[in-house]
Amino acid sequence: MATLAVPTTLSVSRRPLSTHGMPKPPRVTSPDRPHRFSGQGSSVQETTAGYMSPKTPGLMSPPMSARSIGTFIDSEPSTPAYSPRMDHDWDNSPLVLIRPMSTCSEPGSPSEPVWEMMKPFENTQHAPLHLRIDRKESIMFTREMAHAPRIASPPTKKLRIPSERKASLQQEIIAPARKMEHAYKEEKDQGTAGVERPTANTGAPLGKLALKMKSMLRRKSTGDKKKEKKEKEKDYYDPVEDVHWTEIFLPPRFSTSTLQSRFPTKTVLFLLMLGGAAYYFVDVEEEDWTNEVQYSYQDDRSHSTPLHFNGNKEELNHYLQYHIIDPSAALKDPGVAKFLSDEFEKLAFGWMMTQEDAQRDNMPVTHGCRFRSNSPCEDFFSLGTSPGPGANPWNYWSIFDGHAGRQCANQLQWTLIPYVSAALSDLAAFTSSPEVENTIKNTFLRVDKALMDSARTAANWFPAGNAAAVTALAPAFSGSCALLAAFDPERDTLRVACTGDSRAVLGRWDPATNSYTSIPLSIDQTGFNEKEVARLTKEHPDEPSMIDPKSGRLLGLAVTRAFGDHRWKWDNDFITAMQCKFWGTAPRPNNKTPPYLTAEPEVTETEVIREKIGAGKSDFMIMASDGLWDRISSEHAVECVERWLEAKQRGGGSVTNDPRLKSHPPFFPSTFALEDGIEVDAENGKEIDWKATPEFFAIEDENAAVCLARNALGGTRRGLFTGILSISEPLCRYAVDDTTIMVVFFDKVDEQQGAKTTEEKKKSWWKPW
């Protein structure tokens, strides 16, 4: 309920209230039949005839019932209950909003401010000019009732008044009003409650409607409970907060709010201007058939010009003169050769672990690269940490050199390490070495058998040309070598399993020679391996010509052991059926008694020497596909890594900071003479050939695997190196094969050192601290 609060003073008369009534359902009215609570026809004596203000309000209609709470419905438009008329401009009218105490249907004893609205305000002080607010609305104050949910009006915020100002004005205005009320209550308790309560203005008697409303809303106090209820009601009001506008102390920085538009006019205008300029100056090209033609050369867009539209001869001559260039012209520039050399690590897709990476992943520091010769590349690799015997963590590295396709190598990348780890984890922690070796061999054979059986089942089950059968046959139609290294960090034991011609070699420090020596960890399984020739001859005694002694190939294949390769494992009739039904390859000549190939590996076991960094010389391992070993020997590869370690030590942990490298930077001559160490005999049909030897080593890379790849491709023979990088597919395959290299350093990474390096790395991150 909203009331117009007027401080009380001791007097005997009241002024009539405003003409607003309590809420009532709307009803039809007419001039002949006015609203029963409207001002028309009322017998209430008017106290004012003309001017209306909070001190001299107009007529008021009593409430329809004590249950009505909300707004009055008068002959005039609805306005808040007990509020001054909105068509008059009040300047000295404080408004107090009081929420109802309860929602019961019975008439309740109204609180004191209900009656205070009937009392005239006396001794009103005008606000100073600097405190006046240039608004037509009255200043409003609200406060919460103690226990009554809000019914109609929304919550409003309290206006907090400074304590000093409150105290002074409370004594001035509110305290006398409280004293008068206490005096009135004492008279009422003594039996004088029937006497009208006096007011400050004795000359204004109460109107009949006001008296009637008071008699309807006022409840007689009967019993001690009613008295206690009234005493509680006093605590619901904070007299300090029922203040007049004269009690408001505005802060010195008070500023009146100004209505402003939040529409971004300038931003919208700027965007419109920008859009208009773009529409005028930018030519938006719509896609047509020429774009579709260009999309067909998406992978070769920089090398393709499929569209030739020349409007006249002048345009044609311009095109012939300026747009047809010599592709080899740029490669004659030494700057281009230097650029290719500097970007070789990216071209070789190099990667490497740091000491903190190795410490975090519980693996030795490993460097690697994957130089692509075929398109797409047929080499794959994998590495990681996985359970070994006793479920203890082991480290694994593997390289898969695919041939006749990449599907078999890709399949092994997914499956070989997980299957080997699963088989080893079933063993006890102290399983003997022969049993571990046999487990690895059996796992290799089981993986290959599953691959071939899946392909054969799909070929027998699905009809010709079925997509599922073609996908299942793809790993069997192609083939792959496999090189797997498994390291037990608790016992420093390294086991290497090899199927094919990929190779692993160990570099170990020899104090006697003061250099690293090479220890083979695998044996190439080709036709040049006498043991392999003896094994095949024993298995196929009636086929002495199955291995070519000059090329060492088995029925045209360079290796004697491999995964996949259905033409060396299935009979000719089934191979021919696969050729007809699923676009397979034709049977190999002289394929009489298959299978000729096996996936069973040769397994070696080696104890690794490990030292802390800076405390000694630890072993390192080089694993690579045949693309590296075709150009460099195992001994020279170990020597190359040894030189790389020396350059890194001279450079304080960085090869590029090596003083020797800075004093003799790479040189790229523009000569056209044949470089040293390159052999070619075109007259006798001997193709170009070279070997990576120490006199041509170029130690320029931070990555040891990339350093090996660079030297395998020519090293300091810059013309050969640039020429190999410039060969396009498929001719690049005749120069070098796909080359995958991993170099593993078995140094012990100290925990404190690894943590320190990690901390330094975090400090160098984007955070300033």
Image (cartoon, grey):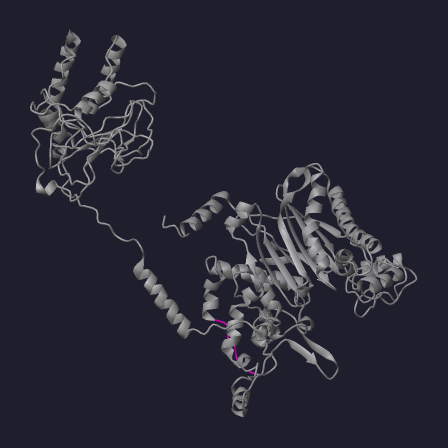
Q: In front here: 352 or 751?
A: 352
Please tell me how many numbered marks the rendered image carries. Answer: 0
For the stretch drawn in magenta, what is the main secondary structure? loop
Q: Position of residue 419 (x, y in %)?
A: 71, 46
Magenta stretch: give its range. 665-671
Is 560 on the left-hand or right-hand side of 726? Answer: right
Q: Is residue 521 above or below residue 217?
A: below
Residue at 45 percent across and 70 percent down: it is 663
Asked if residue 668 is among those painted magenta in the image, a careful observer would answer yes
Q: In front here: 742 or 60?
A: 60
**Residue 463 visible, this orientation:** yes
Q: Position of residue 69 (x, y in %)?
A: 30, 27
**Residue 521 visible, this orientation:** no
Q: Position of residue 357 (x, y in %)?
A: 52, 49
Q: Residue furthest bottom?
A: 313
Q: In front here: 561 or 693?
A: 561
Q: Quadrant of the N terminus?
A: top left
Is 292 on the left-hand or right-hand side of 422? Answer: left
Q: Position of residue 574 (x, y in %)?
A: 87, 59
Asked if residue 148 is among those painted magenta in the image, a careful observer would answer no
Is 151 on the left-hand or right-hand side of 521? Answer: left
Q: Is residue 408 above or below residue 213?
A: below
* Residue 296 position by quadrant: bottom right
Q: Residue furthest right?
A: 542
Q: Is residue 759 above or below residue 244?
A: below
Q: In front here: 447 or 34?
A: 34
